[in-house]
């Protein structure tokens, strides 16, 4: 009887142990989204990108999820910064204007000496993060917001390669200026960027109401395009050929925060808040962070 009871106790503890192991295994099969501070990772990635090249915040989160076993309370600003800098490499190539190279995630995982199982977990976590962000509810691939971004992202990438205006900036400007393609100017004239018809414009025009300063409306003449693609192309030409944008460092920026500020400084928009403060750069930066547009920059920069 004592032996039987002993066996039952042993079996009971074995079952409990297996269940506990399976529980922790199931936890680590997916990234701990509940405790993951997405804004912290976005801001951390941006901090190391400043003056360098765009680092992907999702790579940092996935790697930390594995190396800290999903306990994000162990992450510090310093550890995050050190990991972020691993993705950037200074280079001195004669004749090249690129100061930094962006490493791909496999290079960094090799430097961290991750084993195969750890690498697999990183890629599982990246899949978990596919539709995650500051406003995850809007990042589902079927959402109208993602569909609009996808509709113009390929053309934005082409314009970046041609004119050095970051895709994140182009897309954010299109979102802001056209109200996600729903503004009257966008619908009637395919004008996604609110570009006016100055003396250099020989194409069709349209008159529309516009807000120049805070709570102040006026009527202005805007450019008309045959389609959105033409609007995107003319946007690149408009900025690239205008000396004030070069003078304010728009084309020197490799990081969207810097380029957004350069556009504001060059006078692309006169948007102000109720205190008369210019807010155009802040509006672009907020949109880029909310919709992970900087990740498009990162993906393109790693491939060129």
Image (cartoon, rainbow, N blue to C red):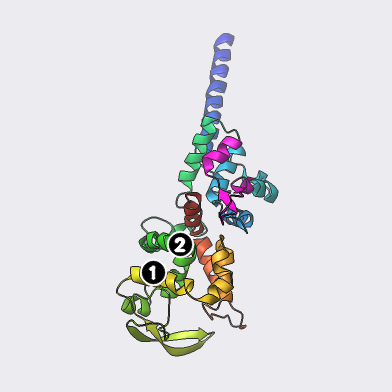
State the CA–CA distance, disc 1 to disc 2: 10 Å
Which residue is at a point 60% across and 43% down the rendered structure image?
64
Of the pair 18 and 78, the residue shown nearer to us = 78
Q: Which residue is mark 2?
A: 160
Tag 2's secondary structure?
helix
Q: How many marks?
A: 2
Which residue is at a point 53% across and 80% down the rendered structure image?
271
Other-residue count near label 2 (Cα within 10 Å), few / some / many at <14 / 14–19 / ≥20: some
Q: Which residue is mark 1?
A: 233
Of the pair 116 and 197, the residue shown nearer to us = 197
In the image: residue 175, left or right of residue 21: left
What span is in magenta?
83-111
Tag 1's secondary structure?
helix
Q: Is residue 98 magenta?
A: yes
* Quarter of image, res 21: top right
* Quarter of image, res 7: top right
x and y percent of residue 251 in the render?
54, 66
Which residue is at a point 58% across and 71% down the rendered structure image?
262
Earlier sequence position, callout 1 versus callout 2: 2
Outermost residue on the front side: it is: 95
């Amino acid at each position: 009887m004592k032996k039987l009871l002993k066996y039952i106790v042993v079996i009971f503890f074995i079952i409990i142990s297996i269940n506990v192991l399976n529980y922790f295994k199931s936890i680590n099969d997916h990234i701990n989204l509940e405790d993951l501070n997405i804004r912290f990772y976005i801001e951390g990635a941006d901090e190391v990108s400043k003056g360098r090249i765009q680092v992907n915040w999702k790579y940092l989160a996935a790697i930390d999820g594995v190396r800290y076993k999903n306990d994000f309370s162990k992450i510090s600003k310093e550890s995050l910064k050190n990991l972020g800098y691993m993705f950037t490499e200074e280079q001195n190539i004669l004749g090249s204007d690129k100061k930094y190279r962006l490493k791909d995630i496999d290079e960094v995982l090799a430097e961290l000496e991750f084993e195969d199982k750890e690498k697999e977990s990183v890629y599982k976590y990246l899949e978990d993060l596919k539709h995650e962000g500051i406003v995850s509810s809007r990042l589902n691939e079927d959402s109208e917001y993602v569909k609009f971004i996808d509709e113009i992202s390929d053309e934005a990438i082409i314009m970046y390669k041609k004119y050095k205006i970051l895709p994140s900036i182009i897309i954010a400007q299109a979102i802001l200026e056209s109200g996600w393609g729903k503004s009257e100017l966008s619908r009637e004239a395919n004008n996604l960027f609110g570009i006016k018809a100055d003396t250099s414009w020989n194409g069709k025009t349209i008159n529309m109401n516009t807000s120049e300063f805070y709570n102040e409306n006026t009527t202005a003449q805007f450019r008309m395009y045959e389609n959105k693609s033409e609007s995107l192309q003319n946007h690149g030409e408009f900025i690239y050929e205008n000396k004030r944008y070069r003078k304010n460092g728009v084309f020197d920026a490799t990081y969207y925060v810097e380029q957004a500020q350069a556009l504001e400084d060059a006078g692309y928009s006169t948007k102000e808040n109720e205190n008369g403060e210019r807010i155009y750069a802040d509006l672009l930066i907020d949109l880029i962070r909310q919709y992970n547009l900087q990740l498009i920059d990162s993906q393109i920069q790693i491939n060129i």
